[in-house]
Image (spheres, rainbow, N blue to C red):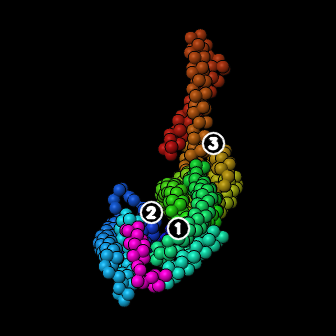
Amino acid sequence: MEEIKIQNLDVSELLNYMDTLINEENPYNVNRKMDSLKAIFYQKINKKDNIKSSEEKDFEIKFKAYKKKKFEYRKKQEKEENNNFNNKKNIIEEIYNITKEKESLKDTFINFKKLTNKWKEIGPVPIHMKKDLWSSYHYAIEVFYDFIKINKDLRDIDFNRNKKTKENICEKAEKLSSNKDINKSHKILQALHQEWKLTGPVKKEIRQKLWDRFKIASSIFNKKRNEYFVELKKKQKELITSKNNISKKIYQLVDAQPKSFKEWNLLTEKCNLLLKEWGEIKGLDRKSNTKAIINKQKALNNFYETKKLFFNEVKEKNKAIIKKQENICLEAEKMQKNTNWEETSKKLILLQKKMNSIKYINSSKSKKITKRFKSACNIFFNAKNKMNKEKQREKNENLVKKKELLKEITNIKFKNEKKEISSTINKLLNKWSTIGQDINNKINFKISDALNKKFQNHSNNFELEILIYKIIINENNKNKYFLKNELKKLKLEYTSLKLKVHQYENNLTFFAKSNKTNSITIESEKKLSLMKEQIKKIKSKIEIINKYL
């Protein structure tokens, strides 16, 4: 599985894939994959308060098991390699021993072939001993062939066979420089070198010539391979630079400091386009690609962590907004059936202003609360409107009744008997007081004027006027504007009359000192008496209004 595929796995899948790698017989075969998996795993896990997650603990246990398996495998390999070294060293000694014994036509060459075949079957040796061991073996082979005399024909057959094999190796090596697949050709060349080593010697006269030919072919290919890797390294550098530049652009996306979901959605689209562009860059080697993946993941983590932080902040702000809306809504719902119309209207209007001043959020919960709030307001104001229509109908009916009463007062006729007059006044006042409010307050003053005119010479005007005023004020006792306006007019009238009374009293004092009684004095006393009577009425009226304010 390539790194780019590992990158697509989640944390749980990475841990499962880790088990597959651990179960490999040779842990060194999956070493690079395990390194890539480790880097990607730590990019994916989320650390909180420096506390290790269960996944991280599980990973550490598995990774320790993998390292232990590597260690044990290496120890086993070292032991096997040391055994192989000793066995191969013994074979070299045995080849030397053959050259010290008397040559036998029957046994010498057969024993030699057995030893060389045994050499080929023995596995690898420690790498730092490999070169010297091979040189010793190669030298022992040459010593053996130089030693052979009786088996000269067999030796020559071997020399010719080895010559053909080595010439074939040279031809194959010479063709490699024209192959386009450098990596495949390199593996072939390594195999050819191994085959060369395992092939026995040729005649002394052509040994160096054949070796030089093979060495030159190898050098030509290696030069081409070096040039290829220099160019590849340059290209790899360009590719990783391109990928890292894209990762840098992703990292810098949040520098714009988006303030809304719309801005974040636009940035996320840009991020996805950059990711697509990143993925389209192919040809990086595994090691470089793993580094590029880590850089990309850091950039993505930065982007999505910043985005998450913004969304969490907005979420908290929205929670606070919804809480405010909920509180306002609950207040409105408590008042929706209240029949204190004027006071509740003012409170609900204030709540509407508060609700409208709250920042709009595109949330289903917020919409539901707003809908509830509007419903509560509608319930109240619909009930109020219904009540107002009913009141309006009653006021219209009352106006008709008051017009009939006014007509009755105007047309009334009675005998000049005090008892009858008093009864009639009480009857009319009671009838008026039970009618209730009408749409036009002017009719009340018309009734008042009509009563005063009708009974001014037949009753106590002061009492009658106060009784009439009580009826008018009682009918408007909830109309604070009317009451305050009426009180203001009365106070102004009261102040004006008090000044006039004071002026008239001063004038009368002056006339009294002159010991003269004339028509002016009499007229002034009469006016003064009327003004005092009017002041008394005003004070009574003010007392009546104050009861309702």
CA gap, disc 1 to disc 3? 162 Å
CA gap, disc 2 to disc 1? 50 Å
Q: Which residue is mark 2?
A: 39
Q: Which residue is mark 3?
A: 457
Query: Residue 423 placed where, x, y %?
Result: 56, 54
Q: Is residue 442 visible?
A: yes
Which picture quadrant has residue 361? Answer: bottom right
CA gap, disc 3 to disc 2? 114 Å
**Where are the magenta residues, as a range?**
133-156
Q: Is disc 3 in contact with disc 2, using a CB cutoff of under 8 Å?
A: no
Q: Is residue 142 left or right of residue 87?
A: right
Query: Residue 109 placed where, x, y %?
Result: 39, 84
Mark 3 neighbour density, 10 Å: few (under 14) some (14–19) many (20 or more): few
Q: Nearer the viewer, mark 1 or mark 3?
A: 1
Q: Above or below — where is 110 with respect to 362?
A: below
Q: How many marks?
A: 3
Query: Residue 101 placed where, x, y %?
Result: 31, 79
* Amino acid at circle 1: Gln
Q: Nearer the viewer, mark 2 or mark 1?
A: 1
Mark positioned earlier in the residue sequence (2 or 1): 2
Q: Which residue is mark 1?
A: 208
